[in-house]
Image (tube, helix red, strand yellow):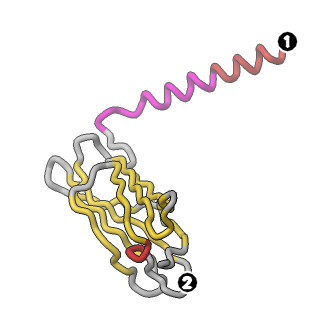
Amino acid sequence: MRIHKKAAGALAAAALATVGAVSVTGPAQAAAAGCVLSITPVRGNISYLHVSNRCVPERSTDKITQTIYWGADWPDNDDYLLDRRYPSLWDTFTVHRVSLNEDSISRDEVYTENRFVRTNGTYYIVKSNEVRKEFVPT
């Protein structure tokens, strides 16, 4: 019983230390921006894919202006696949497999570059994770 109380006390102290550390970060600082790309088959239709690109900007006032979908081709230049102008922060759409098939004989690697504009007019780019699958047309 004593051990459980000590463990609970240690957890409470750790939680307070974490809260203290988090509260030191002021609201004036920007959070880390990020985007997560997922690509899944459309249920019941093997020719189409459901694409979801979910982004979080540095600041809530930043606006996303463009998302470019790239096929990674190391060591060559990456292949431009498609782009979406003024997408939402959680952009979802359905596309035919051939649109994402950037390597005809091997596995495909797709990622996004997401362009954001700040209220002062400057911009920044956030890359998503890379999705590695075979998008062979059927």
Q: Is residue 60 above or below residue 108?
A: above
Q: Main secondary structure of the magenta part?
A: helix
* Residue at position x 21%, y 56% in the image: 86
Q: Amino acid at mark 2?
A: Ser
Q: Is residue 18 magenta?
A: yes
* Residue at position x 31%, y 49% in the image: 89
**Front one among 36 and 75:** 36
Q: Secondary structure at mark 2?
A: loop
Task: Name the mark on residue 106.
Answer: 2
Q: Which residues are magenta?
A: 13-28
Q: Is residue 29 left or right of residue 49?
A: left
Residue 77, quarter of the rendered image: bottom left
Residue 20 in picture, x, y percent from top left: 49, 25
Q: Amino acid at mark 1?
A: Met
Q: Tell me whether the residue at label 2 lies in contact with that at label 1, contact meaning CB atoms closer than 8 angstroms.
A: no
Question: Is tag 2's residue or tag 1's residue first in the polypeptide sequence?
Answer: 1
* Residue at position x 42%, y 73% in the image: 100
**Front one among 49 and 70:** 49
Residue 66 in picture, x, y percent from top left: 25, 61
Please name the residue that numbered disc 1 is placed on. Answer: 1
**Front one among 77 and 20:** 77
User: Dot 1, crowdedness within 10 Å: few (<14), some or many (≥20)?
Assistant: few
